[in-house]
Image (tube, rainbow, N blue to C red):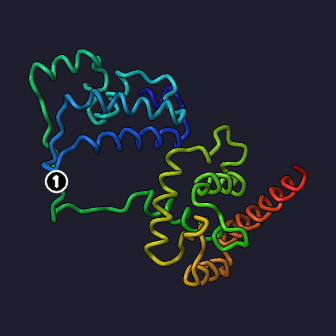
Amino acid sequence: MWVRESRLDFLDTEGIASIVESELNKIIDVQHKLKLQDLRKSVGLAEAELVKEKLLFDLNKDQLLGAFFFTNSEVEIMNFEGFFQEVEERNSGIHLPGDTEDVIHLLDNETLFQLPLISLILLVIASGKRKPIASELGQLVGESIETVFAGFKGSARHLGWSALLRIRTVKSVSFLELSGFVEIRNKDNRLVATKKGQRLLKSVLSKDNELACHLLAVKDAFATAHKDAQYETKLI
């Protein structure tokens, strides 16, 4: 209900969900049991993180508590203090199903589309003359997407500051490192494409399709931004 009324873009919505999920996972023990009294602290930590990432908007603690149980509409509207008063009286907990061999793991939208695109953008900027500093990667990926992809041009929210995008950038860097496509140079902490990564990128860019066109635009935009930064440095 709150998401519909607030009319947030999907990155903000997924950012909120990602922070809530992260805090929820921290309080699930090895026996897959969730102690409901631990939720009070988790809601507080989620609230603090949302404030830090400028994603709290007008969410209150009642709504944040509901976000931890978004599949249950009755819990979603429960009063925050009333919920924990009842939990303390009952000493309640929830047993969660663990992973089993019978569970079918399906690839989600993030795995199928978002992480591969971010990985290719990282390969592009790691293959240029100026190697990006690891701590700047989330910002650079966000700026590249905003510059090149029409749907994000003129966006009111800068993607480079998105907590969710930074998390996905870290995942993509880990994948590229494990696959041998990039490495982080120890002497200056910069991302560098390996020969294997350069071969992969060359193969992708040689195709006559929309993806190759957009990646070439990312390459040009990154090179232009680097030249602009050098020019500004000379002026200073």
Q: How many marks do you count on the picture?
A: 1
Q: Which amino acid, mark 1? A: Gly
Q: Which of 129 and 125 is in front in this view?
A: 129
Local crowd at mark 1 within 10 Å, few (<14), some, or many (≥20)?
few
SS at circle 1: loop
Give the farthest residue toward the left. Answer: 90
- In this rendering, the answer to whether 86 lies above or below 37 is above
* Residue drawn at (55%, 69%) of the image: 186
* Residue drawn at (51%, 33%) of the image: 52
- In this rendering, the answer to whether 208 lies above or below 90 is below
Residue 128 image point, x, y percent: 70, 72
* Residue drawn at (58%, 54%) of the image: 138
Residue 5 image point, x, y percent: 49, 26
Residue 1 image point, x, y percent: 41, 27
Q: Name the residue under label 1.
A: 98
Question: In this image, 121 relative to 1: left or right?
Answer: right
Q: Which of 160 and 107 is in front in this view?
A: 160
Place residue 79 in its image quadrant: top left
Question: In this image, 71 relative to 215: left or right?
Answer: left
